[in-house]
Structure formats: C-alpha cells, structure tokens
C-alpha cells in the first residue's frame, strides 16, 4: 500500500470510465471512499517512483501536513459528488481527474511534476466551470490560468539552470548553501505570481467574479472550497520552505497581500448580489491565509483553511440552490429565504458567524490565535488592517443575514432535500464543537510541515 | 542572442493578450507566449561543443553532450500547450454559437 | 488607455527579466551550459545507461526516470480531448459543408498517401529508444494522416467509437503497467523486463511498450478532436 495509489487509482478509473459513461458518478463515489480509507492506513515518509533514488527520479512526500490537506479535499469532493448525483450526472470523469490532479499537487516533491499536476487540475477546473453555461467567463479563466502556469514554469526553469536539480528538498539545500538571496528574487517572483492566479490573490484574480458569480451547486463549492483550499495548502508549503521571503521582496509581498484583504472586503461591501459577496469574502480570506504563511504562523493558517473550506461549502450550497430555484441572486430577491427553511437558516448563520470570527465558533478561536501570533512578532499595522477588514466584513454579512431572515414582499419557495440538510448540520456542528471545546486544536503545532526537517537531515 | 529572442517572444505574447479583443487572436497570442517559453527552456541546455544525447553503442564515450533534461521538459510543455489550445478553440466555437461574434467588445450580456 | 498600460507592463516585465538574468552569476551564459553539476550528468553515466538500456537519453528520461510526468502529460491530453468532446458533441452529427469541394484525383491520391504516412509514424514510434522521436511525434503523425483523409473527402467520417475505446484501453494499460511494477518489483513504474543491449530494437525493458501505447493514445485523441471540430449538429 503506497501513497501513489491515491493518484493512480482515480486515473485508472477515469480512463476506464469513458467507455461506461452511465456509471461514472458511482465509480467516482467508490474511488473517493477508497481514497479516504487509504489515508488512514498509509505510513509517513517519501514515496519513490520508478525505483530511481533522489534526485534521479521523482518522489512524493506524505507527512501530517499533506495528510490533513488530502483528507479535507478527498472528503469534500466525495460530499459534493454525492449531493450532485442527480443534477450533474455527466461530470463523473472530469471530477475523477480533478481528484487525481489535486492529490498529486499536494503530494509531490518535484517542481516540474508540480507544474504538470497544476495544469491537470487547472484544465479540470475549466471544464467544471463550463457547467455555468457562460463561455466568456470560462475563456477568461482559461487565458489567465495558462498565463499563470507559464510564468510558474519560467521560474522553475531559471531555478534549474542555476542549481541543476528539480527536487524541492534538494533545491532548498542548494539555495541555503549558496546563501545569496538576491539571485533568486526573479524566479520566486514569477512562481509566486503564477500560483497567485490560481489561489485568488489580488491583483491576479479577475477570473473569480465571472466564474463564481454565475456558479451552481457543482462549480460553486468545487472552485470556492476544494480548489481554493488545495491551492492555499500548496502555496503555503512553497512559501514557508522554498520562497522564504526576505528583504525588499518580503515588503512588496506583504503590501500586495494587505491591499488584497482590504480590497476584497470593500468590494464585497459594495455589492448587492449574494454570490458576489461570498466570492469577494473568499478573496479576502485567501489573502489573510497567505499573509499568515509568510509570517510563519503555519498551524493556524491550516486551521483557517479548513474552517473556510467547510463554511464556504455550506454557504455556497445554500445560496446556489436558492438561486437555481428563484432565478436570481440579488439579495433583494432572496429576502425571507429562511422563514420556511429554519434548519438551513440556522446552519448558514453559524457558518457566516464562523467566517466573521464571533465567539462560540471555531472562527473566533482561530482569529484570536493568529492575531496573538502576529502581535508576538510585532506586526502591529497588519493587525490593524485585519481588524479594519473584519469590521467591514461584519457589516456586510450582518446586512445579508438580516435580508435573508426577514420577510420581503414576495413569497419564496425553496426546498432543500434531506442529504443537503444532513451535510449542513454536520458541518455546523463541527464548527460549534471545536469553537467551544478547542483543546484538540492545540495538539498539533508548526512542526506538521516536515520539509525543513528532511532538508536538515540529508 | 537566442535567449533574448525567446524573452521578447514571451513579452509579445503577454502584450497581445492585454490588447487584443478578438477571441481567436487571444488564443494565438497565448501560443506565441508558449513558443517563447519553450525556446527559452531548450536554450538553457545548449553547449557549443556538445552533440546530441544519443548513445548508439557502448563505445560512445568521451564526448560532451548537451543537456537532455530540458528537452524532455519541453516535450511535456508542448503537449500541454496543444491541449490548452484545443480546449480554447472549442470554447471559442461555443462563444460564437452563443453571441454570434468573436469580438469581446460586441458581445452583449444577453445570454 | 488599456493598450498603453499593457505595453508598459510587458516592457517592464521583459526588461526586469533580462536585467536580472544577466546579473546573476549562477545562471550560465548561453552556449556554455556545463552539465557536471546538474542531474543530467548522472543520466549520461554509462552504468546508468546500461541499466536502463535505452540509447536515446531523452527517451530514457521521458519514459524512465520521469515517467510519472509523462503519465501526467498523457492525462492532460486525455482531459483536453474529453473536454472538446464534452462541449462540441451532440447526438446526431454530420460533416460541416465547406466551400472547397475536392475532386476525384484528390480523394484517391490521399488514400495512397495515408498508407505511407501511417508506416512512417509506426517507424518513428517503434524506434523511440534508438533515434529521436518516440510516441508523441508518432501519435501526432497518425492524427495528421486522419486529418488528410478528412480534408480530402468531404463525406468521410472515421469510426469515433473505436477511437474512444482504443484511447481508454491504451491509457488504462499504461497505468496497469505502472501498477504491475508496484506488484512485481517494489515501486510504481519500475522496469520489470530485461534491459537488453543498448542500441538494439528489443531493448530497454518496458520503454518501447509504453511508447507504443502513448503513440496510439495520442493519435486517437487528436483524431477525435479533429472529428469534433469538423462536424456539426444535424439540423434535420
């Protein structure tokens, strides 16, 4: 049993499923369950492919950090597929390939392999967004995604020409040995821009408005929770181990991320469409996560990724189903949504309060912990920016909640079936439980990312 | 010299993506950018005294070879570019069916 | 206004890259790449060459050392062909009417050329471990022969179902060979057939087999893409 099966089995199933189109979604469910079970029994460590030792061949790295990321995205894809079995039946093969691509992205320890899996996941994402029936937004996403990947590859090639290896652990050793940071500013900038396009950092995220602003129950949660979560995980791993921003590059990156937080929240405040409010809030949260990784607060950034992915799944599923039934997503037209759907309304409210960071929910514990971490490192103005952004966030979310709970002029009839409600309740309970009893959160700490350990051991 | 030309092609492609409004021209600019990138990748392995990395029999030693790894990377990059271009053209055909034009300026948000 | 902005950004990016690259000592000058401190020096070491068995070192890297990347690339092409079929296909289809109507000589002559092109492609695929070439160019040549038939005859449609089955089977066999490596040897995609002598046709273990599968897969996928673009819905 080796970790390569997490990637090989979905690929095999995808290749075979084009001959059996009718049952592709059920095969996907089986593969997803197999992956989740496999994650609990695999040992930690490097997995060598092809029998060639490092650095001749490619290898994968499975440690606690990747295990958490893999568990999150495999279970979310399983849940989203199950909820969309009736409405989006023909997307089974595409989702299997997205699963294989994202698993490979999180596991790999080789830079060019990272690029190949980035492209696989990217093309799967473009195909998932075609379900929105808006070819212009898909085209815009395709162009920006290809430019981002090309910039990333450019950076990787410059690093290869300078240091002669493509293995991440080996490259970190060589960069530390040479000690000259000025030489690697150009490749790191290009790689950061390339990943920033996918991870929704400003100013490279003009595709988000078109894609998530017209989303449905399949593409909304997939792009906003699964893809956003995985891209944040891999961006974090590269930022803390490989990039190691210093000097003027650190200042520039911090400014870009801080502007991203404020701009994202301001744009959410200025919008009246519910899907746009949610997606701009995701943009702001992605910038906060990247900022935490830059400052070395790894474990709370990981918890923030998980909390955001779970909350945004609930929020996007609620709003997308409502939009499909009502026909529009202006907050005026969705007034009074929760009067007839009280359980759904309560879970949506809990998820929103967790994103805002109010007490009793896990979002509050996480926010308190990372603000303390930033204060310990004396970044007072960053704390000020995050607090100002939180105030703006509070205003627009409360405004949205008020509109959704109180009756408007028209009656709205939206119904959620039983499986949707079960998922909502489970996620909301998890957010509540970990918010009040949060000692399990303190068991893990910054050492879950073992790449630097491997570098120093070799 | 070749590396300057490769970077200039890359920058041409990015400029084309900023300024063009026709969907087909944007796909062509994307391709020009990828061509520049591929030429740059091959150029980092080149050695004026080197020969092609093919060993016909086990007596071929003592020669200087050019770097075979960038050539393998370019193989993959070209195929990925082909895949993305095919997908882009299919989306362009769908855009034409929905809006009846290829110019981004003339499309109304009616669909 | 946007043109000026785009121009400034592109030119700044280009100048930034050129200045940074010329001022970096570790980045080698063009034409003087020394492979001694790169990984490739170990690929070209004679013991490793005999262990893998392929004379063409680029093939040894693409299918041997970095075979996992090739699996990923084959997946990219697969998902692109799948996407094109997903977006452009409809239940009843016929060929698009073009303005150019081919004549009798073109239709017959193209069938002769089709055979010659197909033989060339098989030669290039089979000799991937001895000469430059391999599965990817060979597959593209197969697809170009199919394109020739499409362009020369405006009533021709290839057998799409059999192409799809060929594509699925070839891809699954690639992953299954990798999994067999996991079962018989210890690692995924490990070579479990004998390596033979460098320079002979029957050498290099699983490399020729994988290249044949890749060539068939690439050929059938691109032929499928060609068919999807040259047909449209029957407006009956």
Image (cartoon, grey):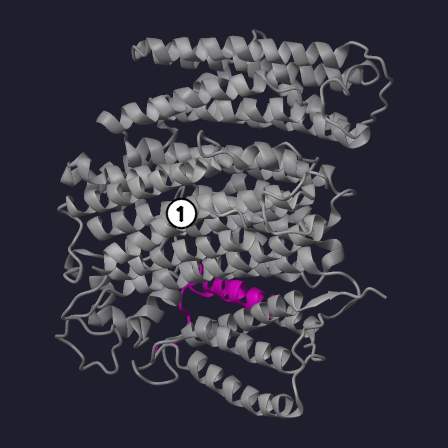
Above or below: residue A435 compared with residue A233: above
- Say whether residue A417 is visible: no
Which residue is found at the position 56% from the left and 8% from the top? A358
* Magenta run includes residue A408: no
Main secondary structure found in the magenta portion: helix
Which residue is found at the position 66% from the left and 48% from the top? A28
Quadrant the N terminus of chain C occupies: top left
- The residue beneath circle 1 is B14
Mark 1 chain:
B
Residue C96 percent location from the top left of the image = 71, 70
Residue B92 percent location from the top left of the image = 61, 54
Left or right: residue C121 versus residue A175 is right
* Magenta run includes residue C189: yes
Which residue is found at the position 34% from the left and 55% from the top? B9
Above or below: residue A5 compared with residue A106: below
- Secondary structure under tag 1 reads helix
Residue A13 percent location from the top left of the image = 62, 56
Task: Give the magenta range.
Answer: C167-195
Residue A235 percent location from the top left of the image = 41, 35
């Amino acid at each position: 049993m080796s970790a390569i099966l997490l990637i090989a089995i979905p690929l095999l199933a995808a290749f075979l499923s084009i001959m059996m189109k009718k049952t592709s979604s059920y095969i996907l469910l089986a593969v997803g369950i197999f992956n989740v079970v496999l994650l609990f029994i695999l040992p930690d460590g490097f997995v060598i492919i092809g029998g060639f030792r490092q650095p001749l061949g490619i290898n994968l790295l499975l440690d606690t950090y990747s295990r958490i990321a893999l568990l999150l995205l495999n279970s979310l894809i399983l849940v989203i597929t199950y909820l969309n079995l009736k409405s989006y039946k023909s997307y089974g093969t595409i989702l299997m390939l997205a699963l294989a691509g994202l698993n490979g992205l999180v596991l790999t320890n080789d830079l060019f392999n990272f690029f190949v899996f980035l492209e696989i996941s990217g093309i799967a994402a473009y195909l998932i967004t075609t379900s929105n029936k808006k070819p212009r937004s898909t085209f815009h996403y395709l162009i920006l995604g290809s430019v981002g990947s090309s910039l990333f590859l450019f950076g990787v090639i410059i690093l290869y020409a300078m240091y002669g290896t493509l293995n991440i652990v080996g490259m970190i050793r060589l960069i530390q040995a040479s000690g000259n940071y000025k030489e690697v500013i150009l490749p790191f900038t290009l790689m950061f821009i390339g990943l920033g396009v996918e991870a929704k950092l400003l100013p490279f995220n003009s595709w988000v408005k078109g894609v998530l602003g017209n989303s449905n129950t399949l593409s909304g949660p997939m792009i906003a929770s699964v893809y956003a979560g995985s891209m944040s995980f891999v961006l974090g791993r590269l930022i803390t181990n490989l990039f190691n921003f210093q000097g003027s590059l650190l200042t520039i990156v911090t400014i870009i991320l801080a502007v991203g937080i404020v701009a994202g929240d301001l744009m959410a405040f200025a919008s009246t469409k519910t899907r746009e409010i949610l997606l701009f809030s995701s943009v702001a949260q992605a910038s906060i996560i990247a900022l935490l990784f830059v400052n070395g607060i790894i474990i709370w950034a990981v918890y923030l990724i998980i909390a955001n992915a779970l909350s945004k799944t609930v929020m996007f599923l609620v709003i997308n189903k409502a939009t499909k039934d009502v026909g529009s997503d202006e907050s005026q037209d969705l007034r009074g949504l929760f009067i007839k759907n009280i359980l759904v309304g309560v879970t949506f409210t809990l998820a929103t309060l967790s994103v805002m960071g109010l007490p009793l929910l896990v979002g509050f514990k996480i926010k308190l912990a990372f603000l303390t971490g930033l204060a310990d490192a004396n970044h007072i103005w960053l704390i000020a920016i995050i607090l100002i952004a939180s105030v703006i966030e509070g205003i627009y979310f409360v405004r949205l909640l008020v509109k959704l709970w109180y009756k408007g002029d028209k009656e709205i009839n939206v119904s959620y079936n039983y499986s949707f409600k079960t998922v909502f309740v489970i996620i909301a309970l998890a957010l509540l439980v970990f918010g009040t009893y949060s000692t399990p959160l303190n068991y893990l700490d910054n050492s879950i990312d073992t790449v630097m350990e491997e570098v120093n051991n070799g | 010299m070749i590396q300057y030309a490769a970077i200039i092609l890359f920058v041409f492609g990015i400029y084309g993506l900023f300024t063009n409004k026709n969907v087909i021209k944007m796909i062509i600019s994307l391709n020009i950018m990828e061509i520049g990138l591929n030429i740059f990748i091959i150029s980092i392995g080149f050695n004026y005294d080197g020969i092609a990395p093919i060993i016909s029999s086990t007596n071929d030693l003592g020669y200087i070879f050019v770097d075979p790894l960038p050539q393998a990377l370019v193989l993959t990059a070209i195929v990925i570019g082909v895949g993305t271009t095919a997908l882009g053209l299919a989306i362009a055909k769908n855009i034409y069916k929905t809006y009846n034009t290829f110019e981004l300026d003339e499309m109304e948000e009616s669909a | 206004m946007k043109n000026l902005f785009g121009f400034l950004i592109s030119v700044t990016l280009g100048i930034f890259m050129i200045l940074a690259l010329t001022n970096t000592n570790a980045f080698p000058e063009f034409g003087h790449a020394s492979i001694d401190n790169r990984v490739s020096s170990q690929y070209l070491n004679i013991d490793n060459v005999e262990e893998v068995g392929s004379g063409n070192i680029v093939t040894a890297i693409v299918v041997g050392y970095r075979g996992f990347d090739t699996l990923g690339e084959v997946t990219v092409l697969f998902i692109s062909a799948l996407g094109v079929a997903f977006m452009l296909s409809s239940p009843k289809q016929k060929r698009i009417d073009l303005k150019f109507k081919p004549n009798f000589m073109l239709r017959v002559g193209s069938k002769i050329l089709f055979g010659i092109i197909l033989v060339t492609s098989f030669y290039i695929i089979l000799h991937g471990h001895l000469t430059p070439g391999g599965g990817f160019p060979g597959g593209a040549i197969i697809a170009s022969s199919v394109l020739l038939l499409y362009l020369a005859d405006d009533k021709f449609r290839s057998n799409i179902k059999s192409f799809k089955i060929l594509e699925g089977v070839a891809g699954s066999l690639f992953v299954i060979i990798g999994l067999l490596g996991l079962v018989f040897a210890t690692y995924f995609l490990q070579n479990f057939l004998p390596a033979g002598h460098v320079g002979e046709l029957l050498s290099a273990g699983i490399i020729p087999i994988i290249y044949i599968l890749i060539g068939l897969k690439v050929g059938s996928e691109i032929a499928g893409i060609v068919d999807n673009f040259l047909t449209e819905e029957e407006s009956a």
